């Protein structure tokens, strides 16, 4: 099941994607669950499936404005350098612990929205990533039970302003420029992606394939990351964990082909779909 948050007629809504349209769950369940995050926390997936089953779409996808799948996440956490392509020249192989950093919701555009090349830098890069969405809260979660806390998945362009990553010991500024990345177009429930062993991830810029990898290149698995993160913080419904990006980002090229205004970027992860954005100058 594909679940979507969107705007229509000036109102924020959520629903179930059905073909080329949306079955509006806000009209059916909004009195109890005002947002998709509330519906997830309320364990309302089965009810949404029943309500959407056999129902005609209320709106066509071209008639809505996409929003982030989870519009008010408490946390967006990212795993840095989590694919082997980044470590092929490292003598001791890889890091012993995941590199975790936060992203602000405002650092992302939605599907079909504009990613902004910062006014102060020309080094805007792209990173296609699979994102897990938490459905059950937990702390000190055992690795063998970590997937019980995942309710679904979405796609992230974890855009990075590389120059600013080198301005200090932490990479937070370079990872949090306003609308420097994107999330979407929707989330799929976990049953749509039952096997994470080799999920393809492809990034295209102006139709040219730049990244073409799969999750079998991960250093730290999603269950390990969830267990690790839950040691220092509570995970709550609607939290997002981006799992890292395969090789092929602009920073690896000589010379780098940074994203520039006018570019179109697409990140495809089946069976989620395609996250598409254009680049504009801030």
Image: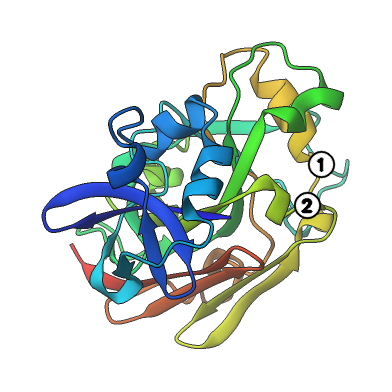
Q: CA separation, marks 2 and 1? A: 6 Å
User: Is residue 89 in view from this perspective?
Assistant: no
Measuring from the top left, give residue 26's x and y in whole percent.
31, 44
> What secondary structure is found at the residue carrying circle 2?
helix
> Pointer 2: residues within 10 angstroms few (<14), some, or many (20+)?
some
Q: Residue at x 55, y 28 (%)?
A: 43
Residue 87: mark in rendering: 2
Question: Which residue is painted at 59% across and 55% down in the image?
Answer: 129
Residue nearest the observer in this picture, 150 or 17: 17
- The residue sitting at 29% across, 76% down in the picture is 62
Figure quadrant of residue 217: bottom right
Seen from the viewer's position, the closer of residues 172 and 102 is 102
Contact check, label 2 and label 1, Cβ < 8 Å:
yes
Residue 237 visible in the snapshot: yes
Q: State the image coordinates of residue 117 (x, y, percent, origin top left).
A: 28, 64
Image location of residue 3, percent across then percent down: 48, 52
Disc sitting over residue 124 in the figure:
none
Mark number displayed over residue 94: 1
Whichever of labels 2 and 1 marks the residue nearer the N terminus, that label is: 2
Q: Nearer the viewer, residue 208 or 95?
A: 208
| Quarter containing the C terminus | bottom left
| Residue drawn at x 40%, y 45% as measured from the top left | 174
Q: In the image as oriented, which residue stretches furthest toward the bottom?
A: 207
Question: Which of the image's four quarters has the N terminus?
Answer: bottom right
**Structural crowding at the residue carrying mark 1, measured as other residues with C-alpha within 10 Å and reported as few (<14), some (14–19) or many (≥20):** some
Name the secondary structure under disc 1. Answer: loop
Q: Is residue 83 above or below residue 100?
A: below
Q: Quadrant of residue 124?
A: bottom left
């Amino acid at each position: 099941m594909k679940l979507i948050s969107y705007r229509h007629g000036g109102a924020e809504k959520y629903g179930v994607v059905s073909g080329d349209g949306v079955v509006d769950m806000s009209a059916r369940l909004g009195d109890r669950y005002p947002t998709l995050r509330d519906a997830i926390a309320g364990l309302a997936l089965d009810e949404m499936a029943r309500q959407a089953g056999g129902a005609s779409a209320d709106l066509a996808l071209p008639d809505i404005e996409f929003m982030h799948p989870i519009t008010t996440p408490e946390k967006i956490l990212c795993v840095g350098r989590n694919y082997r392509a980044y470590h092929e020249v490292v003598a001791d192989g890889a890091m012993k612990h995941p590199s975790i950093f936060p992203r602000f919701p405002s650092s992302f555009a939605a599907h079909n929205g504009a990613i902004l090349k910062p006014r102060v830098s020309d080094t805007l890069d792209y990173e296609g990533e699979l994102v897990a969405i938490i459905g059950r809260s937990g702390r000190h979660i055992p690795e063998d039970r970590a997937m019980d806390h995942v309710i679904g998945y979405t796609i992230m362009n974890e855009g990075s302003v590389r120059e600013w990553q080198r301005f200090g010991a932490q990479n937070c500024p370079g990872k949090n420029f306003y609308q420097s990345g994107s999330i979407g177009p929707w989330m799929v429930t976990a049953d749509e992606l039952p096997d994470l062993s080799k999920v393809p991830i492809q990034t295209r810029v102006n139709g040219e394939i730049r990244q073409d990898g799969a999750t079998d290149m991960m250093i730290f698995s999603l269950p390990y990351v969830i267990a690790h993160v839950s040691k220092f913080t509570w995970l709550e419904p609607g939290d997002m964990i981006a799992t890292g990006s395969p090789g092929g980002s602009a920073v690896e090229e000589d010379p780098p082909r940074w994203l520039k205004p006018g570019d179109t970027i697409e990140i495809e992860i089946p069976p989620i779909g395609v996250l598409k954005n254009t680049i504009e100058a801030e």
